[in-house]
Image: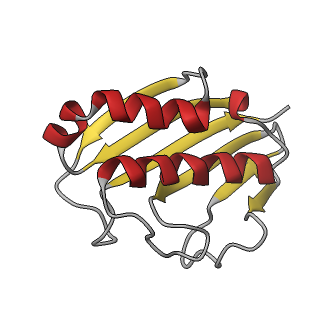
Amino acid sequence: MTLKTIQPDGWAPAKGYANGMLTEGQTLHIGGQIGWNGDQVFEVHDFVGQMEQTLQNIVDIVEAAGGAVTDIARLTWFIKDKREYLARQKDVGAAYRRVMGRHFPAMSVVVVADLIEDEALIEIEATAQIG
């Protein structure tokens, strides 16, 4: 099987991982994305802002592979604060729709003790079927 590494133009290189891997069958496996920009800088420090940036990062990778939001088939969310997630559902929904529209793939949300990047409040993995 041939795999193609997907890296959006202008993004800082990933260190020790790939942002996305596209298979011959056009399945795109997207590594865990967090709420920093393409330069690996956190511009926002609140949960909803990081969530929106994380989703945008996923969309950027999908588009770099030639796909669209509607090609995203699965999202797995890893969050550090269950209470904030539940308390901000209205804001979470609005931010989600700004990036993803009304496309709702299979999703799971997992509460974790911590993430590798200290500033990260959320990490999301995704799978897309391109084309």
The percent position of residue 75, horizontal first and vertical second, equals 49, 35
Give the residue displayed 70% in from the left and 44% down from the top. 28
- Marks counted in the figure total 0
In which quadrant is the C terminus drawn? top right
User: Is 40 in front, or is 113?
Assistant: 40
Q: Is residue 87 left or right of residue 71?
A: left
The percent position of residue 117, horizontal first and vertical second, equals 34, 71
User: Is 67 in front, or is 46?
Assistant: 46
User: Is 55 in front, or is 73?
Assistant: 55
Compared with residue 46, is residue 118 higher up or lower down, i.e. above or below?
below
Compared with residue 31, is residue 86 higher up or lower down, i.e. above or below?
above
The percent position of residue 68, horizontal first and vertical second, equals 76, 36
The percent position of residue 70, horizontal first and vertical second, equals 71, 27
Q: Hey, which quadrant is residue 42 in on the image?
A: bottom left
User: Is 103 in front, or is 93?
Assistant: 93
Compared with residue 122, is residue 91 higher up or lower down, i.e. above or below?
above
> How is the model colour-coded?
secondary structure
Q: Is residue 13 left or right of residue 115?
A: right
Give the residue displayed 52% in from the left and 75% down from the top. 40
Q: Hey, which quadrant is residue 27 in on the image?
A: top right
Give the residue displayed 54% in from the left and 76% down from the top. 16
Give the residue displayed 65% in from the left and 78% down from the top. 13
Q: Is residue 24 left or right of residue 82?
A: right
